[in-house]
């Protein structure tokens, strides 16, 4: 292909969107409101890569409109076997088209035609271009010539195979012009085009080469010997029809020709808004905007230019003491107990700044800086907790955190995939910071100063935005004080008995092997790999002939949910061993992860994330201490390895009993629930007696289980079908239980209905404390996204209020423990874990009960339970 001609890139939009959909798991890509985005993300990622590689001058993306085309009129069976698009895929193509429009890329579609015909027409007209076609449909190979290359995805959408005329010949032994004749003979199951029995790819290729074309073959049909020849003669009309259907239209009258497809320029602020709405990370946005030309009028604004930051020329010892409201950007390692700062920049409100390499400071400057950082002078950060750990690594105990622009940005737009400084700066101020890679690896004079200046700009802008939505107090009184508390908890960590963890890990390794051996024996295959979906499919659905699970692209699902349901409905010892193997393997992996994270001080230092869960809950990573099961024997065994540290007397745990149900009673104002809690009744027995119309004494464990599952399920938008699945009872019975519940507890029904209606009207939900969760998908045309958003709307005010309550309790407990040696180590869901110093046991217990109980006044009493022991499990209650 010559390189002097301009380049045209043509993309079959539906084909590549489907490829992207199946390449990325839908469950890992959705907005907090429930809109699936895996096809959108994969498509845009592919687009960024291809545009960067091909560097086209012009571009168009063609889309199908519907199933009905002139081909279905000719042959009603055409593509008729294809199932309807998965619910998760629906709506994603519309989103892709919207984003392409903001990127200044032409999209085309036409009723009664396929995307193939649009692309074929444009490629045929593009004599003056080198044309590249991106598609997952091999029919396009008929368009390949010296100036047209097909880029065909081989793995998902990340690897593309280049089909030039030579590559087509090498792969199929045929010229591109002969390919549709070959395809017509071979048939195409994906398009529902019948094949000729006994005529496979080899025979089809041999015949086309021998007679030159399908027409030549038809002329000599009588000369072909054997069963294959007779089969061909019997089906000549069908083969001719296949050939007609495979032929692309190359002379459509389109609204745009190749010369009309130049990039129109990305509208940066609109692209950013779309990416924020979809909760995509900044990395993809950067890749897209780096690859695609920008509209000249909407070039991203630069950050505060280095020329606008006045570099302080007076000595640090004179400039810094007493200075307040200064933005601080710290560079280094921000992990708990492993942090270390290498450099930092300070910028004040007048954009006067100073940058310091910490290893080169004089003793006097080092002392002045440490004193200022440890003072109460107000300081602004982006990720203050990380800065706390970096400075702690140098022996500095950070104080005076007056702003954390990452947390402010999170409160304004919860659920975003990233709150990195560059992303927040772009999101809220539509300004672009120089990319981190350029400035943080090479410490120049302006890189860090620009980061600090961006924090200073954001502090003012985000304060205003928070005030506009009445969330500024939530920020200053709840989230900001929590930063220092969490930082200290992370730095302290929790002591671990590594020997116990290693013994448990070894036991699980043995159990994994035992279950695998038992499963292999039942399957009659000594080499069976239980982690291989392909091998499992063979054993489950062929060897053991078990009922098929949900169909997937690669066969039938062997995912946990499907196997658990199969085991419940069709018990089989093999399934028992498979599920046990998976459970033990999960525990083994958890233990290996925990052992790796024990630091030299013999403690595990988890990281608590304030900006991850869109409901306001804290999450825990590196390692995640919230996913250690509390109700299983294995989980309790792991908790027993978390022990009281040297010099301390005991661990104390304190948690809220049924906090979400109590919040539900308060928010719904349901008289029945409120009465049950005020009278101190066992809630589930009380509700069970009302729902099943029996005395409290006759509520059996099974009835209690059903009611409990439903009560908690309602908070998560559980349907009657979902309840029937969970309890293993007929849907009709589950529906009756729910109807009885709502009849007795009408306040709950009214609240659940109204909260969704109000959220649909407002576009967001609120907790008791005003924490918002935005749910634009409530008005989505996509049923799956809309129903997911409705479930989120039910759950967010309840779970979010519960999250706020435990945070308030942490702040109150922290204040009350001031001056004592006992300290809070962990927050896990509704539980606090405290390491108690000798002689402080009773006082600490009283503090926890008092401060947690008075965190909020609800219409029902809170109930705090405590327990003590020399390890986390023994301290359970």
Image (spheres, rainbow, N blue to C red):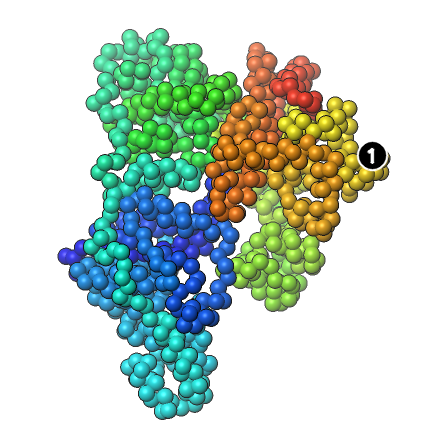
Query: Residue at point 65% right, 34% down?
Result: 750
Left or right: 122, with 823 as reference point: left
Q: Residue at x 29, y 12 (%)?
A: 316
> Which residue: 79% across, 40% down?
692
401 sits left or right of 426 in the view: right
SS assignment at label 1: helix
**Residue 573 falls in which quadrant of the image?**
bottom right
Q: Residue at x 52, y 47 (%)?
A: 783
Give the residue pinned by disc 1.
Answer: 696
Q: Is residue 661 visible?
A: no
Q: Quadrant of the N terminus?
A: bottom left
The relative height of residue 180 versus residue 811 in the rendered view (above or below) is: below
Residue 344: x and y in percent read: 33, 22
Residue 315 lies, with reference to residue 253, above or below; the image says above
Asked where in the image residue 838 lies, by quadrant, the reply is top right
Q: Nearer the viewer, residue 142 or 64?
A: 64
Task: Report x, y in % for residue 199.
Answer: 42, 80
Give the number of callouts: 1
In this rendering, does residue 654 appear at all?
yes
């Amino acid at each position: 292909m010559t390189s002097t001609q301009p380049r045209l890139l043509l993309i079959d939009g539906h084909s590549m969107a489907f490829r992207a959909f199946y390449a990325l798991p839908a469950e890992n890509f959705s907005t907090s409101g429930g809109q699936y985005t895996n096809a959108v993300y994969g498509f845009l990622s592919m687009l960024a890569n291809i545009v960067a590689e091909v560097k086209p001058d012009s571009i168009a993306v063609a889309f199908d409109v519907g199933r009905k085309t002139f081909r279905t009129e000719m042959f009603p069976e055409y593509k008729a076997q294809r199932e309807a698009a998965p619910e998760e895929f629906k709506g994603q193509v519309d989103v892709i088209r919207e984003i392409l429009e903001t990127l200044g890329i032409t999209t085309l579609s036409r009723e009664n035609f396929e995307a193939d015909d649009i692309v074929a027409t444009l490629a045929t007209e593009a004599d003056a271009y080198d044309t590249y076609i991106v598609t997952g449909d091999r029919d396009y190979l008929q368009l390949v010539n010296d100036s047209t290359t097909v880029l065909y995805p081989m793995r998902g959408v990340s690897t593309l195979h280049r089909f030039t005329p030579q590559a087509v010949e090498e792969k199929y032994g045929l010229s591109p012009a002969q390919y549709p004749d070959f395809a017509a003979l071979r048939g195409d199951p994906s398009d529902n085009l019948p094949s000729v029995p006994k005529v496979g790819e080899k025979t089809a290729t041999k015949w086309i080469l021998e007679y030159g074309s399908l027409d030549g073959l038809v002329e000599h049909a009588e000369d072909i010997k054997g069963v294959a020849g007779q089969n061909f003669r019997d089906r000549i009309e069908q083969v001719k029809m296949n050939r007609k259907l495979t032929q692309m239209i190359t002379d459509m009258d389109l609204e745009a020709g190749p010369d009309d497809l130049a990039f129109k320029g990305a509208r940066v602020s609109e692209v950013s808004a779309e990416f924020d709405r979809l909760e995509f990370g900044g990395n993809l946005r950067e890749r897209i905007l780096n690859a695609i030309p920008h509209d000249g009028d909407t070039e991203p604004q630069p950050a505060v230019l280095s020329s606008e930051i006045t570099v302080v020329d007076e000595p640090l010892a004179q400039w810094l003491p007493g200075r307040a409201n200064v933005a601080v950007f710290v560079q280094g390692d921000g992990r708990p107990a492993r942090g270390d700062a290498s450099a930092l920049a300070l910028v004040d409100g007048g954009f006067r700044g100073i940058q310091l390499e910490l290893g080169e400071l004089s003793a006097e400057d080092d002392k002045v800086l440490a004193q200022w950082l440890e003072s109460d002078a107000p300081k602004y950060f982006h990720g203050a907790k990380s800065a706390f750990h970096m400075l702690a690594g140098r022996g500095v105990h950070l104080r005076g955190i007056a702003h954390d622009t990452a947390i402010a940005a999170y409160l304004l737009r919860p659920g975003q995939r990233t709150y990195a400084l560059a992303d927040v700066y772009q999101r809220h101020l539509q300004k672009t910071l120089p990319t981190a890679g350029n400035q943080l690896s090479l410490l120049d004079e302006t890189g860090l100063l620009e980061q600090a200046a961006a924090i200073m700009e954001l502090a003012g802008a985000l304060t205003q935005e928070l005030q506009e939505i009445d969330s500024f107090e939530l920020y200053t009184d709840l989230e900001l004080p929590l930063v220092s508390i969490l930082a200290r908890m992370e730095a302290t960590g929790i002591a671990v008995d590594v020997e116990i963890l290693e013994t448990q890990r070894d036991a699980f390794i043995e159990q994994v092997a035992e279950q695998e051996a038992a499963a292999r024996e039942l399957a009659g295959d000594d080499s069976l790999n239980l982690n291989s979906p392909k091998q499992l499919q063979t054993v489950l659905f062929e060897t053991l002939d078990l009922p098929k699970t949900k169909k997937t692209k690669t066969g039938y699902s062997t995912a946990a949910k499907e196997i658990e349901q199969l085991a419940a409905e069709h018990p089989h010892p093999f399934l028992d061993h498979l599920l046990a193997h998976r459970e033990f393997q999960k525990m083994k992996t958890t233990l290996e992860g925990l052992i790796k994270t024990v630091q030299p001080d013999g403690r595990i230092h988890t990281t608590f994330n304030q900006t991850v869960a869109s409901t306001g809950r804290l999450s825990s990573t590196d390692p995640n201490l919230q996913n250690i099961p509390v109700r299983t024997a294995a989980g309790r065994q792991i908790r027993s390895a978390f022990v009281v540290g040297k010099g301390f007397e005991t661990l104390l745990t304190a948690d809220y009993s049924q906090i979400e149900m109590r919040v539900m009673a308060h928010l719904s104002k349901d008289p029945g629930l409120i009465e049950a809690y005020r009278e101190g009744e066992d809630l589930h027995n009380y509700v069970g007696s009302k729902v099943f119309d029996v005395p409290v004494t006759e509520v059996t464990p099974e009835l209690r289980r059903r009611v409990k599952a439903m009560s908690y399920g309602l908070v998560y938008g559980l349907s009657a079908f979902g309840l029937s699945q969970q309890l293993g009872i007929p849907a009709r019975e589950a529906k009756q239980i729910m109807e009885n519940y709502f009849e007795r507890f009408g306040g709950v029904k009214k609240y659940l209905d109204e909260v969704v209606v109000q959220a649909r009207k407002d576009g967001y939900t609120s907790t008791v404390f005003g924490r918002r969760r935005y749910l634009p998908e409530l008005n989505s045309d996509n049923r799956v996204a809309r129903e997911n958003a409705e479930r989120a709307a039910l759950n967010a005010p309840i779970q979010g209020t519960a999250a706020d309550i435990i945070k308030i309790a942490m702040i109150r407990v922290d204040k009350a423990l001031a001056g004592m040696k006992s300290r809070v180590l962990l927050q896990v869901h509704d539980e606090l874990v405290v390491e108690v110093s000798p002689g402080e046991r009773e006082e600490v217990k009283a503090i926890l009960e008092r401060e947690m109980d008075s965190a909020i006044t609800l219409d029902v009493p809170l109930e705090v339970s405590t327990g003590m022991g020399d390890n986390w499990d023994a301290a359970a209650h």
